[in-house]
Amino acid sequence: MSAIDQLLARGVPLMPRPLVRRFAAPYIAGETLAEAVETSRRLNTAGKRVTIDVLGEEIDALGEAIAIRDTYIAVLDALAGNRLDGDVSVKPTGLGLNIDRDACRDLIGAIAEHAAACGTTVEIDMEDSSTTTDILAVYHELRARGHQNLGIVLQAMLRRTPADIDAMAGLQPRVRICKGIYVEPPDVALQGFDEVRAAWVAALERLIEIGAYPAIATHDAYLIEQATARVTAAGMAPDAYEFQMLLGVRPGLGDELVRTGHPVRVYVPFGNRWYEYSVRRLRENPGLARSVARGTLARLIGRD
């Protein structure tokens, strides 16, 4: 990322909320469950599965975490009631990880239990490296309690990830492997673009070796090419892996994967905490941040 892009990314929170909402709209389904259901139905019709995410992270009151759990229960009921091909993804800090790890574990366990009754799965999302150890502990504790319908996310950029994959050998885990989006120090995470790409490919190869169900999360055409070559070489059936993409990000790549017979799942976030999520998306996407900046400038000089 260039110095200009870094400056723009840092300035995103200063942009007017209506402008952020306008440019971030493709990345969120809306504020209501009904909007998330409609978006999911449209994606299913296009041959894509969905993962619904209730927006909200780093909450500071257990009551808020309980409310988010209840919203997830409603989401699962809506998926089942509308016969949608989908599951849910949860952020541990949105379910109280930073308040009470055991309470967070139990809230995720309750969501997983309800998901099992609805015939679907739950993905535990990964956050910044300060939470990685606790998130993985929650995952392993819940797996030990018999919640086999839980998936976990690992970030290829983290130096610890190869060891974390090896620790899952024998579990036949569902693992979403992504590059990682958080800004981390060099002693914690790889920094070079090519270095992270190579680590991502190596992580996918190791997941295949241990018999995992890899959820291949990337919009990088090169990595998609590498991944399709590896699942094909391993003789993996379409029910043994999937590609995952974010709502509104390079949908044409997902369409092409569907056309060539690969399973694709789209991450569908919704909720009234759209602004915080949108700011994060804009920070991650310098091109979009530049567009927002241009729009802001045009408004200030009266040309928009």
Image (cartoon, helix red, strand yellow):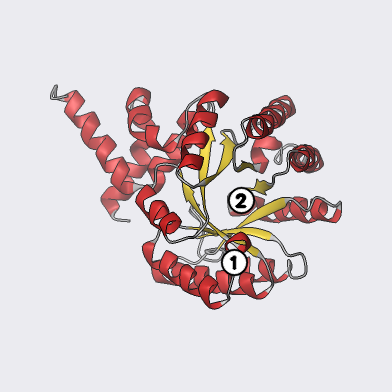
In this orientation, does residue 187 appear? yes
Classify mark 1: helix, strand or loop: loop
Name the amino acid type tagged 1: Ala
Question: Residue 42: x percent and y percent?
Answer: 46, 36
Q: Which residue occupies 40% across, 42% down?
A: 248
Of marks 1 and 2, the one in the foreground: 1
Question: Based on the displayed image, in which of its 4 quarters is residue 292 positioned?
Answer: top left
Residue drawn at 52 percent across, 44 percent down:
267
Question: Could you say which disc has been placed on residue 237 in the image?
Answer: 1
Considering depth in this image, is 188 or 52 the residue closer to the camera? 52
Quadrant in which the C terminus appears: top left
Left of 73 or right of it: where is 268? left
Taking depth in this image into account, of 54 and 213 the one nearest to the observer is 213
Q: Nearer the viewer, residue 285 or 74?
A: 74
**Residue at the spot 81% in from the left edge and 40% down from the top edge:** 106
- Residue 75 sits in quarter: top right
Task: From this view, report whether residue 230 is shown above or below residue 31.
Answer: below
The amino acid on which the numbered mark 2 sits, given as a three-letter code, is Met
Q: Distance between the residues labelled 1 and 2?
A: 27 Å
Residue with the mark numbered 2? 126
Asked whether disc 1 touches disc 2, contact meaning CB atoms under 8 Å apart, the reply is no
Q: Is 96 on the left or on the right of 304, as rendered?
A: right
Mark 2 surroundings: few (<14), some (14-19) or many (≥20) residues within 10 A:
many
Residue 289 lies left or right of residue 133; in this view the side is: left
Q: Can residue 250 be seen in this view?
A: no
